């Protein structure tokens, strides 16, 4: 993704020989009871994986009712994942985000709508140029209600696109925060080539698809750019 040559080599190698999703420890995660994160100061947390976390972070930062988005790793069977270890495809983790939001302003269902509207939901093990199980799509649910919402939306999009939807629906267990240099990456590096050529396109896709969920300041940026 970011260190193009070295990461491309690693990604191509392990995407061909990746065993993360067939590992017995990984498969066992699907049968666990989800961990529900309690509200704090009236704010809830939701967790998603949809390709590069730089892209996903910038998208959800632009959603009404969202206070903060943190990049990290989730969905794997190992402890203390890092960018380097997750990129091998062996840990089972995917680049993920933690979305801290006000459920009185935006619902979990809205966040799932943003999720499907800001990616290619049919792409398996990746988004755009980012390939490998570490870039796969996952909706993490914390209770039966969220699971039902995710399953209903997935079925809706399958019908809408007349295609198989790649997103996993997985019980949430733990979120591991990514290294500091990944946080707020798009905001701090607006001229980065990856941000300009990949991330921005996904952000604009979301803004076109869900204008009613876009923060006013994000809309102002659109108008300025246009």
Image (spheres, rainbow, N blue to C red):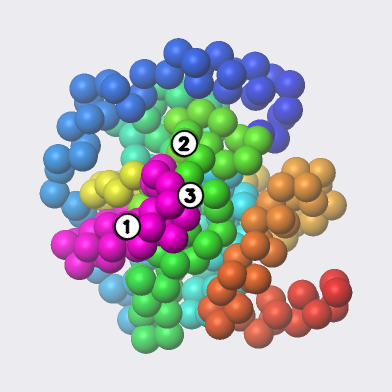
| Secondary element type, mark 1 | helix
| Image spot of residue 127 (x, y percent) | 57, 42
* Contact (Cβ within 8 Å) of mark 2 with mark 1: no
| Image spot of residue 225 (x, y percent) | 85, 72
> Would you place residue 90 above or below residue 159 in this image?
above
Give the CA distance from mark 3 to mark 1. Answer: 12 Å
In magenta, the rendered stretch is 140-167
Q: Indicate which disc residue 124 carries.
A: 2
Q: Nearer the viewer, residue 142 or 37?
A: 142
Q: Residue at x 27, y 57 (%)?
A: 151
Tag 1 or tag 3, which sits nearer the N-term?
3
Quadrant for the N terminus in the image: top right
Q: Residue at x 85, y 78 (%)?
A: 224
**Badge 1, how many Cα within 10 Å: few under 14, some, many 20+?**
some
Q: Is residue 135 visible?
A: no
| Magenta stretch contains residue 156 | yes
Q: Find disc 1 in the rendering and name its residue.
A: 155
Quadrant for the C terminus in the image: bottom right
> Would you place residue 75 above or below residue 121 in this image?
above
* Contact (Cβ within 8 Å) of mark 3 with mark 2: no
Q: Indicate which disc residue 117 carries.
A: none
Q: Find disc 3 in the rendering and name its residue.
A: 121
């Amino acid at each position: 993704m970011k260190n193009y040559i070295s990461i491309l080599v690693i990604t191509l190698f392990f995407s061909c020989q990746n065993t993360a999703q067939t590992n017995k420890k990984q498969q066992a995660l699907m049968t666990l009871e989800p961990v529900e994160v309690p509200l704090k100061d009236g704010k809830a947390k939701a967790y998603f994986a949809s390709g590069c976390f730089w892209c996903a972070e910038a998208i959800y930062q632009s959603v009404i009712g969202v206070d903060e988005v943190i990049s990290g790793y989730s969905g794997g069977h190992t402890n203390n994942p890092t960018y380097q270890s997750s990129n091998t495809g062996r840990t089972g983790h995917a680049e993920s985000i933690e979305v801290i939001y006000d459920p009185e302003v935006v619902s979990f269902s809205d966040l799932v709508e943003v999720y499907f509207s800001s990616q290619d939901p049919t792409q398996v093990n990746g988004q755009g140029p980012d390939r490998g199980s570490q870039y796969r799509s996952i909706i993490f649910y914390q209770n039966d209600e969220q699971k039902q919402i995710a399953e209903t939306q997935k079925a809706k999009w399958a019908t809408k696109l007349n295609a198989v939807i790649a997103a996993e629906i997985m019980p949430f267990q733990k979120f591991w925060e990514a290294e500091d240099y990944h946080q707020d990456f798009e905001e701090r590096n607006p001229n980065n080539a990856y941000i300009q050529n990949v991330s921005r396109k996904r952000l604009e896709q979301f803004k076109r698809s869900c204008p009613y969920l876009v923060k006013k300041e994000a809309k102002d940026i659109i108008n300025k750019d246009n």
